[in-house]
């Protein structure tokens, strides 16, 4: 798949995200910052990066373009996508069942293995540490409801 096509898909997804941001209902609470602010900033930045990526692919300066005919992508692309997809799917499916920590760690493990991390104790400690830090920051400190850190409801 060409990088120009990928950049075009990214911009289509950004357009869908803009549409979704504008469909967020107004807050019933009167405040300076509404529920649209953070998603709007994020979508604007991602759209800007998408346009920048499209321009770099058009000029053949994108870092993921192959400039030599004999160049080939790294082997194992399908495996990398499966690791990433499996980690995300594990997070989506398991969070309601067993809490936040283990699914978030599995998601992090999938992402790290997609980027060639080895499956060992060091990687496990890092993904569990990151997941625990995120839960502590957002749920315990900032009050965002991420659910329990561990829930065994068998």
Image (spheres, rainbow, N blue to C red):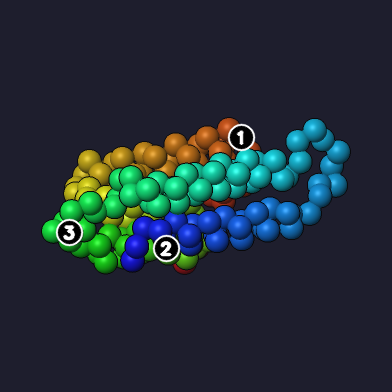
Picture coordinates of residue 42 (x, y %)? Answer: 58, 43
* Furthest residue in direction front, as rendered: 59
Q: Which residue is mark 1?
A: 142
- Residue to which mark 2 is pinned: 5
154 is higher (above) or lower (below) than 48: below
Q: Earlier in the sequence, mark 3 or mark 1?
A: 3
Mark drawn on residue 22: none
> 65 or 45, which lies in front?
65
Residue 104 in view here: no
Distance (Cα) linking label 3 and label 1: 51 Å
Question: CB atoms at circles 2 and 1 under 8 Å apart?
Answer: no
Closer to the camera: disc 3 or disc 2? 3
Q: Is 149 displayed left or right of 31 in the figure?
A: left
Question: First in sequence: mark 2 or mark 1?
Answer: 2
Count neighbours of disc 3 (C-alpha within 10 A) and say few if under 14, some if 14 to 19, many if 20 or more: few
Q: Secondary structure at mark 3?
A: loop
Q: Counting residues from the N terminus, which is met first, the one under dot 3 or under dot 2? A: 2
Q: Nearer the viewer, residue 100 or 31?
A: 31
Residue 69 — which label? 3
> Considering only vertical position in the picture, is 4 above or below 154?
above
Mark 3 vs 2: CB contact within 8 A: no
Is residue 86 positioned above or below 30 on the image?
A: below
Mark whose residue sits in front, 3 or 1 = 3
Instruction: Name the residue rendered at 33%, 66% in the picture.
Output: 1
Q: Residue at x 52, y 35 (%)?
A: 137
Q: Residues within 10 Å of mark 1 (few under 14, many from 20)?
A: few
Q: CA distance from mark 3 to mark 2?
A: 19 Å
């Amino acid at each position: 798949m060409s990088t120009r096509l990928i950049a075009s898909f990214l911009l289509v997804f950004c357009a869908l995200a803009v549409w979704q941001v504008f469909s967020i209902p107004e807050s019933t609470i009167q405040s300076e910052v509404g529920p649209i602010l953070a998603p709007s900033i994020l979508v604007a930045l991602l759209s800007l990066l998408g346009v920048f990526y499209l321009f770099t692919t058009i000029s053949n300066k994108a870092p993921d373009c192959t400039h030599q005919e004999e160049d080939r992508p790294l082997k194992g692309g399908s495996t990398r996508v499966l690791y990433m997809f499996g980690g995300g799917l594990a997070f989506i499916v398991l969070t309601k069942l067993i809490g936040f920590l283990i699914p978030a760690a599995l998601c992090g493990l999938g992402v790290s293995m997609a980027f060639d991390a080895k499956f060992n104790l060091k990687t496990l400690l890092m993904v569990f540490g990151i997941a625990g830090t995120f839960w502590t920051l957002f749920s315990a400190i900032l009050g965002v409801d991420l659910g329990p850190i561990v829930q065994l409801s068998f």
